[in-house]
Amino acid sequence: MSSIVLTELETEPVAAQESAGGATWYAFRTNPMGVAALALMLALLLVGLAAPLLAAYPSGFTSDVLQPPSTEHWFGTDNLGRDIFAEVVWGTRISMTVGVCASLLAISIGVLIGMLGAYFRRVDTFLGMVVDLSLSLPVLPLMILVAALAGPSLGTIIMVISFFSWPEVARIVRSQALSVVNLPYMDAARVLGGRHPWILRRHLLPAVAPVITVTVVLTASRAVIAEAGLSFLGMGDPNSWSWGRVLYESQQSGSMTSAWWTTFFPSVAILLLVVAATLIAIAYNDARNPRNRRD
Amino acid sequence: MPPIAWFALRRVGHGVVTLWFAITITFLLLRLLPGDPATAIASTNMDATMRQELLTKYGLTESLPVQYVKYLGQLVQGDLGMSFSQSEPVSTVLMSRLPWTMLLTGSALVMTVVIGIPLGVAAATHAQGALDRAVQVIGVVGQSLFVPSVGIFFLYVLGLKLQWFPIGGAYDENVFGAAWYLDVARHLVLPCLSLVLVSLGSYVLTLRSTLIDSLGEDFCVLAHAKGTPERVVVWKHGLRNALLPTTTLLGLQLGFMVGGAVLTETIFAYPGVGREIYESVIRLDFPVLQGAFVLLALTVVVANMLTDLAYGLLDPRVRNA
Amino acid sequence: MFKVYPDVNTEILALKKGDVDVIANALPPAQVKDLKGTKGISVAEVPGLGFTHMTYNMKRKPMDNVLVRQALAHAVDYEAIRAVAVQGQAVTANSSAITDTLKEFANPSLKEYSFDPQKSKALLAQAGVKDLKLTMIYSLQDPVISAWSSMVKDSAAKAGITIDLKGMDRNTYLAKTVEGDYDIYAGSFAIMDEPVSNMSLQYLPDGAINYSQVNDPKLTKLIQQAQAAVDPEQQKTLVQQAAAHVHDNMIDNIMYVQNLNVAHSSDWDGFVVKPSELLSIVDPASLANARHK
């Protein structure tokens, strides 16, 4: 049989086969809320990266203690006369770093345990119990306890937050993985002789990837709030400038009501970051769900 | 035994194991804290013999396993030990404060549900509309707020400037009788409001999305096709299904709230367990910390057990698993 | 009626609103100006009877070298700390263990160490010490010290000294203090009004609050003589000599005496101010004297 030479056929080009990812990105792109949130997040990221260019590192002291916002100090000064705008800008770095690191750490542990639990039914009951137990513990008090145990430092904070965030991730990943693990294609992979690590990596992981994306973003934003809370209580790192530290200094000096700018700006910064993260997650979920897409 | 009984038994057993786990974890964590617990009890000028006496009195000289077994034994009898810094039984210290935390978190939880359900329903039924957008904004902004900032803001505006509410505390000493309840309520408003604002966000958003999902399910479409009034479809069919995962969320939220009340209680000078925990950490008061965690874990475990049992009652798929 | 407020911000709001009449604990320095200018609120000053200081652990190298200790003392901007962190609500202690509050026993010839980073560098070079790195412990529950700790760090950097700030919760801080586990210690004493017994506790080798970890035979002898002295004039001289010895050898870096401020509603007066942070204006005698206008 002679092969058909397709080039001779003049046919109407069929609409390009969209990949699922492409469709998601398209839906996301056309959602104004999602795009705005993404832009905000990128702007915050930029501020963090460009901190040295935007303001001098806050240190030392001046005699302009607790001055309200002015042309010279856009966000006012704090209890030692330092520029709050600089503190918030540099705080973006630290707070986002803590958020991202804690989140990544929590994700790594959580994804691993969630997938293992869904895949290997034998360990599932045990792992499930561990996760449930961790979820039942009062999180903030334990964080306070461990932070006091290990001493206040950025490393401690990151470890503490991720240690208490991974169970939530594991729970979500596990339920997502469970819905996939019994599908025919997974059985097929096993029948084909695929070894477990390969199946986990090649098949299960992509299936839970969308949930991971959302969880990374949400966990990071929750980590930022947790860091602020811990710092506010005095468990934060006194050597680095995070948004939580700015709030802590405000609280310690009794300035929260007499100098509104000392709490307002860092709180707004936290608000913006978390709102952006949440909106991105919502928009992504909406975009991913074929039912929501306006085709 | 009917499946529901098995289910209940399994859940209770699960709960007991969880509790034991929580107790053990906090026991170990506390013993690993740096610093000499004797400094918490005694002043730094104490000489070596006195310090030894104190350590022995509080049972801190024995080996870890021995201390552990003794502690478990005490727990089973309901004895939570003696506070290091307050020369009072831990149970006294905690019992005077636990009711306030329960009141605060309990009312916050109730308000969240009472406000959250109508809002979530309104958002889901008007999906993508203006009302939905408004609710989403409230939800997203709400869960992004930093509790202490919100608290101080409320205290300043509603407490000082408008003079509507008292500044902190749970009640006034000079009020008695029926008026006392009103006074407690007045003191409760601001702290409760701060907590509700933050927890409402995630509750409403979750309810909204699960409700949208279940309204799109076949059984709801069928109900519509049958001509059932809109209101019944939403409230009877859609909501009942959507409430299931949101109820589990509530159980989780209770855990967060009880612990998260630390910040609220600090700002509002509300005499609850959360703040007591924080201060015990500072003072290295092991027994109080231990007792507080046990109580909190117990509360959360019981709450989760109840929600799971309720889930099992409502959803046959779960109890027959 | 005593109410406990965990947060000073809420406390101040309560006073402003009228929910409370008196705030018993000392005000954060930064709030004094604001409260003085608030209608209906009076601020009373409580003269300080103690002091705030830093000590250098003499059992650790290179702090056993007097030149290094002096270098460290010259690397602190005392005036700035008093002006900014304590908002001018403190007076110099002349770097002397016996502050001017104890007029009788103070040594008038002692002057505060100057803030001179260049001199620090020279002294360090003389001592043959390069790249000095030290840790400083302080209690995070002390807001004023927590505030100026960063100032100490920054000014020391100007003299090429790196100070690693280790703020810790009070109990860990106390534990480390007792064990002598620190390079630099920062803290304060509320009442130091008994010169001879204070010095014994501070500078005798087995003294309970010997945070300098000092064991100086000459100083020990002076103090013991002061303890044994029967004649008040002789005792005074010995105390002044001991203070001079501590000052010249930089055994204890006394930074300032803080005057505390307490706030109360203007509707009340008659409080008797007692110079102690522990009692301030709420000790029984003072409360008994208070009158509602």
Image (cartoon, helix red, strand yellow):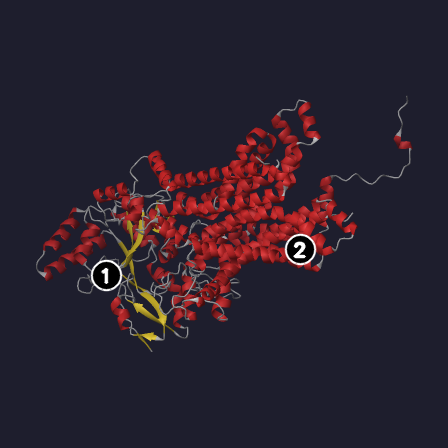
Rendered location of residue A29, percent (x, y) = 71, 49
Query: What distance separates the C-alpha of mark 2 from that of mark 1?
Result: 70 Å
Does mark 1 fall on the same chain as mark 2? no
Residue at 70% x, 53% y is B234
* Residue B45 as seen in the image, left or right of residue A54: left
Rendered location of residue A1, percent (x, y) = 90, 21
User: Looking at the rendering, in which quadrant would you find the C terminus of chain B?
Assistant: top right
Of all residues shown, which one is farthest toward the left? Answer: C230
Residue at 53% x, 34% y is A127
Q: Which of marks 2 and 1 is in front?
A: 2
> Helix, strand, or loop for circle 1?
loop
> Helix, strand, or loop for circle 2?
helix
Give the amino acid at mark 2. Answer: Val
User: Looking at the rendering, in which quadrant would you find the N terminus of chain B?
Assistant: top right
Task: Name the residue that disc number 1 marks.
Answer: C99
Task: Name the residue that disc number 2 marks.
Answer: B121
Cβ atoms at labels 2 and 1 below 8 Å apart: no
Residue B15 appears in view = yes
Residue at 59% x, 52% y is B202
Depth check: A217 or C195 in front?
A217
For disc 1, the neighbor class at 10 Å (few under 14, some 14 to 19, many from 20) is many
Depth check: C201 or C165 in front?
C201
Residue C168 appears in view = no
Residue at 13% x, 55% y is C226
* Residue B154 as seen in the image, left or right of residue C1: right
Rendered location of residue A124, percent (x, y) = 56, 32
**Quadrant of the image occupied by residue A252:** bottom left
Chain for numbered disc 2? B
Depth check: A122 or C142 in front?
A122
Give the amino acid at mark 1. Answer: Thr
Depth check: B132 or A14 in front?
B132
